[in-house]
């Protein structure tokens, strides 16, 4: 059984954070596709190490953490110009 609460709350918080990521033209830092790939790999490893909330047996990952990652990416790509 998938619990909706951590997924929705994690996505909303991640979306808000993703919209706050903006490019600074004066900075030489780039937020390209390679950064997304590294972020996804690290987030999956962290979600596996965190594990699910107590008494949640739907998956070995922290679902709220993965939903926050998805929210960050969606927020960055849609509104974080």
Image (tube, grey):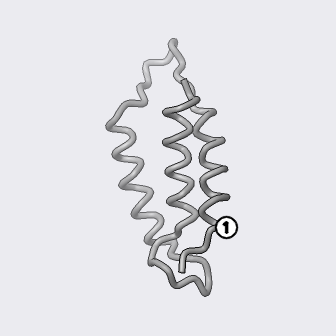
Q: How many marks?
A: 1
Residue depicted at 60% across the width and 77% down the height:
53
Q: Nearer the viewer, residue 72 or 48?
A: 72
Q: Residue at x 39, y 41 (%)?
A: 36
Q: SS class of the residue under badge 1?
A: helix
Please give left or right for residue 52 compared with residue 28 in the image: right
Q: Is residue 53 above or below residue 77?
A: below
The C terminus: image quadrant? top right
Give the side of residue 41 with respect to residue 80, left or right: left
Pointer 1: what residue? Answer: 5
Q: Is residue 17 left or right of residue 45?
A: right
Residue sitting at x 67%, y 58%:
9
Residues 55 and 1: in front is 1
- Within-10-Å neighbours for mark 1: few <14, some 14–19, many 20+: few
Estimate the x, y position of residue 68 in percent, counting from the top left: 56, 54
- Between 36 and 26, the one lying in front of the other is 36
Q: Residue furthest top?
A: 26
Q: Nearer the viewer, residue 4 or 43?
A: 4
Image quadrant containing the N terminus? bottom right
């Amino acid at each position: 059984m998938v619990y909706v609460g951590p997924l929705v709350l994690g996505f909303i918080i991640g979306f808000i954070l993703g919209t706050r990521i903006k490019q600074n033209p004066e900075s030489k830092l780039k937020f390209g596709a390679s950064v997304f790939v590294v972020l996804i790999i690290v987030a999956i490893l962290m979600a596996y190490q965190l594990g699910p909330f107590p008494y949640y047996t739907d998956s070995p990952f922290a679902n709220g953490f993965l939903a926050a990652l998805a929210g960050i990416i969606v927020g960055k790509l849609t509104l974080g110009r």
